[in-house]
Amino acid sequence: MQGSRQGACCSCPPDSGTGSLGFIGWKSAGLEARQNLKLAGIHVSTRRRRVWGPLLDWPATQVPVSTPPAPTEPSQLKLGAALQLLTQSGHPLPDLNEVGSAAWLQAVIDALCDLSSRDPLTGLANRRQFELALAREVDRVARAGEPALVLMCDIDRFKLVNDTHGHAAGDLVIQAVAQSLMDCVRPMDTVSRFGGEEFAIILPNCPPAFGQTVAERIRRKVEQREVAINISETLKVTISLGGAFAPQWVRSSAALWIERADQQLYRAKTEGRNRACLEMPPVSMVSAEEKGLLFAVSQFQDLE
């Protein structure tokens, strides 16, 4: 696509005339703003179209990206405001001249979807993303019978940190603990900020011995870490963990799984904090023959 640039950032797409991207400061005789997405080569899933569809309704008026219209409702979010949001959050976008407008717009949509699933303070998965991942893990455990562990983690005496050193120091502690959690898990694991000073971790394909090892590794990592809250002062905090294994070959509920892990977290707190308490995995009463049948049925269903 040929186009000329007028006062926009290097990652912004060219304008295609009336009703297109002129509001972010580009001019071009290329792609029409409201053309069919399939003709543009852009793949947007049904879920993403429902969430981010308003981005594709580009206005015809000239609106500088530096002063995007303030949306009063989520449906009024426009591309200029979305670009500013991604810039402020540090999400990189590809160069339009290298990837083309279709791939560039797809990258914007992907970045917004990723941003909506992240906790802004820590960069971990947010609670909504955790609940989606947990629901998928419940289904997987019921089908394949592999062991899985949920860990609930809580920073000990965190209120004292906020009251003594201020909320800015508390944010630094939360960020440091989040990094410690990420350092102790596998890429396949899901680490999320569950709320406040509480975190939740999903460990798929996790035998009991391995789960206990990971929980203890996290506890030691946090205990040994020094958090710099200013130039001359550091803090050390501890963490309590509670874990529960999913019942294999049984379709449990995500809420019950979290509740069982929470009970173990409460146990860790009452026994003195700075410890990991894991519930023993439930013993499966399903025979080997029944497991083979269940696995075969689940594989057949997956192919439908």
Image (cartoon, rainbow, N blue to C red):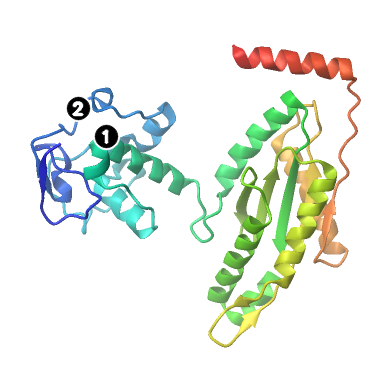
Q: Nearer the viewer, mark 2 or mark 1?
A: 1
Q: In which quarter of the view is residue 188 placed?
A: top right
Q: Secondary structure at mark 2?
A: loop
Which label number is shown at residue 137? none
| Helix, strand or loop for disc 1 | helix
Residue drawn at (88%, 44%) of the image: 280
- Please say if 156 is above or below 260: below
> Mark 1 belongs to which amino acid?
Ala
Observer-nearest residue: 284 or 59? 284
The quarter of the image holding the C terminus is top right
Q: Which quadrant of the view contains residue 272? A: bottom right
Task: Please tell me whether residue 229 is drawn above or below residue 196 in the rendered image.
Answer: below
Vertical side of 287 occupied by 212: above or below? below
Q: Is residue 32 left or right of residue 89?
A: left
Residue 102 - label: 1
Q: Position of residue 94 (x, y in %)?
A: 31, 47
Pointer 2 or 1: first along the chain: 2
Q: Residue at x 10, y 53 (%)?
A: 6
The residue drawn where x is 76% and y is 62% is 219
Question: Cβ–Cβ below 8 Å for labels 2 and 1?
Answer: no
Residue 120 placed where, x, y %? Answer: 48, 57
Give the amino acid at mark 2. Answer: Gln
Residue identified by numbered label 2:
35
